Amino acid sequence: MAKTIVVKQVGSPIRRPKDQRATLVGLGLNKMHKTRELEDTPSVRGMINKIPHLVEIVEEKG
């Protein structure tokens, strides 16, 4: 079973640069307090590290 992480959007993309908004969309987040369960890969971790002020890791599974 692959490791997964649950990511929650805690910040608004309003008045943020386009690349940060695109990163949120790439993670599958587009509304406040929405959560997604994603595979724990280096690319996903890099996207999360790019916008730590907009998302938080709620839970790590596996």
Image (cartoon, rainbow, N blue to C red):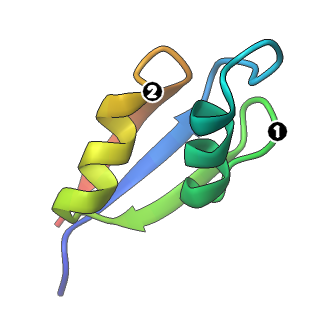
Q: In this view, does 21 lie to the left or right of 38?
A: right
**Mark in front: 1 vs 2:** 2
The quadrant of the rendering that contains the N terminus is bottom left
Counting from the top left corner in percent of width and height, residue 60 is at 26, 50
The residues bearing labels 1 and 2 have C-alpha atoms spaced at a distance of: 15 Å
The image quarter in which residue 36 lies: bottom right
- Tell me the residue that label 2 is attached to: 51
The quadrant of the rendering that contains the C terminus is bottom left
Name which residue lies at 40% across and 22% down.
Answer: 52
Hey, what amino acid is under mark 2?
A: Ile
Q: Residue 5 carries which label?
A: none
Q: In this view, does 4 lie to the left or right of 38?
A: left
Name which residue lies at 58% across and 58% down.
Answer: 26
Helix, strand, or loop for circle 1? loop
Counting from the top left corner in percent of width and height, residue 27 is at 55, 55
The image quarter in which residue 39 lies: bottom left
Name which residue lies at 66% across and 23% down.
Answer: 17
